[in-house]
Image (cartoon, rainbow, N blue to C red):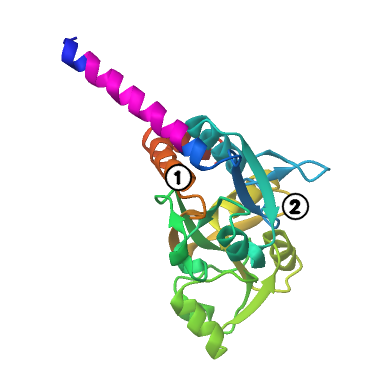
Amino acid sequence: MRESSVKQRKHMMVFSLAWLCFSAWAMGSDQSIKFGYGDHTTPPFVFRNDQGEVTQGITLELGRALADQVAMPVKFVGIPRPRLVQLLSEGDIDLYCFVKPEWIPDSGRFLWSPPLLTETAIFVLQNGAPDFKNYLELQGKHIGTIRGFRYSSILTKMFNAGDAIREDSTTLIQSLERLKHQRIDTMLGSDILIRFILKEHPEQYPFKLSRFSDSTDYTGCAISSGHYQKATLLIDAFKVIKESGRLEQILNAYR
């Protein structure tokens, strides 16, 4: 290797180390990653023990990958969905993942990671129920939905007009139970969550998936801009985690 190349690599390493040290100094004593997650979040994103502590899941593995990348410990903080904007704005949490700007009020006040995950809203049906092929076939149907979740503009217009009936639940499990007892005609939710639940509990929820889906979203992480140096480090770390293939390894472990 040429001497100039060796010197250049050494300069880059020194610069990177200096930047990390400066960032840690600028953040003062706040040298941890406060990773917020919804207190409503279910497997495979978050698994909890009897004490409510996060023990495994996509969120945990992503947090650990970030911690490795920026050389800071990570703390997982369960938060209620209505307080998300406030906690991010005030820096009580550093980031909240698997959301998109359109889902968060005043999302422009936050920094954003690159898109990390693709989620499709899919329909679940009783095994003996006929499938449907388009929105017209949803007319008059009672559709199990998740409270506070936004669906496609077409389906939202149908709900607002009364052409389809929105039946909100707090969790997917509640919605699945409604479908099991035939209180709704179909239910709608994230393909990642639904496929995991049906795979883990095939006897409890012997349902089928519709070939028709509502929408596909590309989600990432909202990052508090309260500590700009930390936010910058996190954004760079997300890029490395995604481009290195580590993110895909984490997701594949729960598919």
Name the disc covering residue 100, or none.
none
x and y, in percent, of residue 126 in the image: 65, 64
| Image height of 244 relative to 225, above or below | above
Number of residues whose C-alpha sits closer than 10 Å to that of mark 2, classed few (under 14), some (14–19) or many (20 or more): few
Q: Quadrant of residue 172?
A: bottom right
Magenta includes 15? yes
Q: Nearer the viewer, residue 222 or 144?
A: 222
Which residue corresponds to mark 1?
A: 229
The answer to whether the residues at label 1 and label 2 have Cβ atoms under 8 Å apart is no
Magenta includes 202? no
Q: Which numbered disc flags the more N-terminal residue, 1 or 2? A: 2
Residue 45 seen in the current view: yes
Report the residue at 56% width, 50% height from top: 94
Report the residue at 43% width, 54% height from top: 112
- In which quadrant is the C terminus drawn? top right
Q: Nearer the viewer, residue 209 or 15?
A: 15
Classify mark 2: helix, strand or loop: loop
Which residue corresponds to mark 2?
A: 204
Cα distance between the residues tagged 1 and 2: 48 Å
x and y, in percent, of residue 186 in the image: 62, 69
Q: Quadrant of residue 179?
A: bottom right
| Image height of 136 relative to 37, above or below | below
Report the residue at 62% width, 45% height from top: 44
Q: Nearer the viewer, mark 1 or mark 2?
A: 1
| Image height of 56 relative to 9, above or below | below
x and y, in percent, of residue 101 in the image: 45, 64
Q: Which residues are magenta?
A: 6-22
Three-letter code, disc 2:
Gln
Q: Quadrant of residue 149?
A: bottom right
